[in-house]
Amino acid sequence: MKAVNLSPLWHRDQYCIAIRNLDDRGSMVVRNFPNRQYSKTHGCWYVPYSPATLDVLLESLAEAGEVKILQPFDGHPRPNAASIKVKPLLPEGFRECLIRLRYSESTCATYETQLLQFVEHIRPLAIHEITRQTVDEYMIYLIEKRGVSVSTQNTAINAIKFYL
């Protein structure tokens, strides 16, 4: 039987309890725990931190097996500024234009995501400095490095074309 690991986690500007290394019994406990969510980014379950939540979580998981706290939960040390990524912003009016042309909410969200990923990739190049070569290089990156599907590639190019 493996021990469930608990550790502090900053996720989406919130201090949380990361829950890792779950077996079947531990997984059942966590799936029934209130306010639990899964983070693909961190590859773990998490709940918002409070001393009471930590106590209840420890008690609940102890019934399923051994629990280890890997780091103390004293204080709320924020990540340093160098480790925080600044998210790029959408070009002004991009979403409004999609809405005005009656694109579905799903298409708006997808185009926004694809354009933001493109802007993040070309950084520090400003979006108004985009050339055909920039777009071609990004398409090669999507295919060779990220291994995206044809439909994802088409969505990315359509979002970029829509902006341009």
Image (cartoon, rainbow, N blue to C red):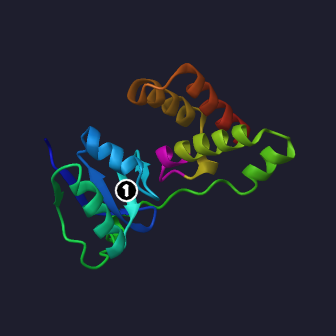
Picture coordinates of residue 152, whole percent (x, y): 57, 27
Residue found 30% across the figure and 68% down from its top: 54
Magenta segment, which residues? 119-125
On the image, the x and y values in percent for residue 135 come to: 56, 34
Secondary element at image label 1: strand
Tell me if residue 11 is in the magenta stretch: no
Nearer to me, 20 or 152:
20
Residue identifier under label 1: 46
Q: Around disc 1, counting alpha carbons within 10 Å, would you say few (fewer than 14), some (14 to 19), or many (20 or more)?
A: many
Is 33 rendered above or below residue 132? below
Against 12, is 37 above or below? above
Disc 1 residue type (three-letter): Tyr
Image point (32%, 71%), residue name: 80
Q: Residue at x 29, y 58 (%)?
A: 60
Label tally: 1
**Magenta stretch encompasses residue 123:** yes
- Give the residue at the far top of this rendering: 150
Looking at the picture, how far across and down is residue 1, in whole percent? 13, 41
